[in-house]
Amino acid sequence: MNAVSFWILGIGLENGIASPPKRGPLSKLTEPMEIATIRTTRNAIDYVAIGLATAGGAGFMPKAPGTAGAAVGVMLYLAFEALHLSAYYPHAIIFFLVAGVWASFRVEALYGHDAQRIVIDEVVGQMITFSFAAGRFRLPAVYVIAGFGLFRLFDIFKPFPIRHLERLKGGVGVMADDVGAGIYALIILFIVWHVLGR
């Protein structure tokens, strides 16, 4: 390869011709044919969707973004309790659920199906875990920690039928499995609360 060839190659690399633009890590669920459809251009609506889907950037954590998303859900529960806004907690769950379906559907075109950066599903699932207490009584710290652990356990191991729910297409599939994990965690935490006492 002569000097001219090196110069042409250098220009190509500089302009992104010789190597494609970097993208975030694709989910294991992203099909090979799906990768070709991922967009690299973004507009203002995309950035709104990214902000929602990544829970304000928690999804960009280099390690355990799902855990970071669940932690956002815990913080939202604690914030509602601290601000005495627990009566609106169910409304917040519904809002983030609907907004999460839309945002996940839109962001999938940028990062791939159920990409690791999408953590709004963990936020909603974790919020659901504490929904039996919100507006009625404040959970002690030990139950908040237990609820966090239970949700992550069900989210990771995905007992029946959670694993089937994640196979649904689009934003519904992204959100559904974590909603299921949140419901499982809610049931167990509710039972523990009544068995062990308050």
Image: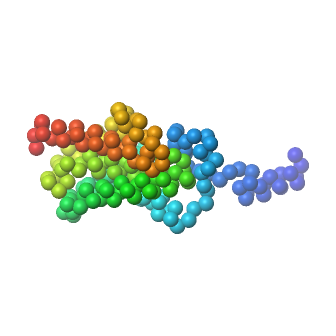
Left or right of 34? Residue 63 is left
Q: Is residue 80 above or below residue 172?
A: below
Q: How is the image coloured?
A: rainbow
Judge from the rendering whether residue 181 lies leftward or rightward of residue 32; answer left or right.
left
**Residue 166 percent location from the top left of the image:** 43, 40
Task: Say whether residue 156 is visible.
Answer: no
Q: Is residue 112 left or right of residue 168?
A: right
Residue at image point 15% right, 41% down: 193
Q: Residue at x 62, y 42 (%)?
A: 33
Q: Quadrant of the C terminus?
A: top left
Among all residues in the image, which is located at the extreme left? 197
User: Given the current orientation, which residue lies at the most extreme bottom position?
Assistant: 44
In the rendered image, the vertical position of residue 56 relative to residue 67, given as above or below: below
Q: Residue at x 48, y 48 (%)?
A: 170
Where does residue 24 sit, x and y in percent of width and height?
A: 55, 49
Residue 175 in the image, given as x and y percentages of width and height: 40, 48
Residue 151 shows up from this direction = yes
Q: Quadrant of residue 90?
A: bottom left
How many labels, in total?
A: 0
| Residue nearest the viewer, comparing 3 with 82 | 82
| Residue 13 position within the rendered picture, expressed as x and y whole percent measured from the top left | 74, 54
Determine the residue positioned at 10% across, 40% down.
Answer: 197
